Amino acid sequence: MPLDLFIDSGNIENNTGLSVSKKLNKDNGKYVGLYVENKGSGPVVATINGRSEETFEKGESGHIYVEVTQGRFGADKEYEFKVVPGTNGGMINIHYEIAQRESR
């Protein structure tokens, strides 16, 4: 069983949010997760490939996950991780971590 694979992490403070794309291989773990800690004053919305949408209010943190699949002919597949300001827009201030693992 593979160990957790660290993919990316950081802190973002801006009005556009996070947009990171990475090619993943399911042999490195069945799931990929995005952890978000909202340190800002308004809500943020996190997605992976436009799915698993979750809103994190001020002071909230948590994970979203999707199952990793392969592309055509077994090629690595691109995954897009986004965290954007909530419905009212504005600045965001988050800490994020992306990791691939065998379980949620």
Image: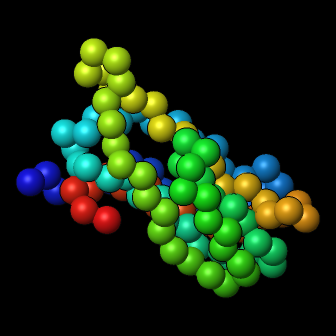
Residue 6's x, y, as percent? 33, 53
From the viewer's perspective, tell me whether residue 51 is left or right of residue 12: left
Q: Residue furthest left?
A: 1
**Residue in the foreground of this view, choosing between 44 and 17:** 44
From the viewer's perspective, tell me whether residue 77 is left or right of residue 89: left
Residue 50's x, y, as percent? 61, 45
Q: Total label count?
A: 0
Taking the spot 22% from the left edge, 44% from the top edge, the residue there is 28
Picture layout, residue 27 above or below residue 32: above
Q: Can residue 12 be seen in this view?
A: no
Q: Residue furthest bottom?
A: 59
Residue 96's x, y, as percent? 54, 62
Q: Residue furthest top?
A: 73
Which quarter of the figure has residue 4? bottom left
Taking the spot 19% from the left edge, 39% from the top edge, the residue there is 27
Residue 16's x, y, as percent? 79, 50
Picture layout, residue 36 above or below residue 24: below
Taking the spot 48% from the left edge, 68% from the top edge, the residue there is 63
Q: Quadrant of the N terminus?
A: bottom left
Q: Quadrant of the C terminus?
A: bottom left
The type of colouring in the image is: rainbow
**Residue in the foreground of this view, choosing between 41 and 101:** 101
From the viewer's perspective, tell me whether residue 88 is left or right of residue 3: right
Q: Can residue 86 be seen in this view?
A: yes
Which quarter of the figure has residue 54? bottom right
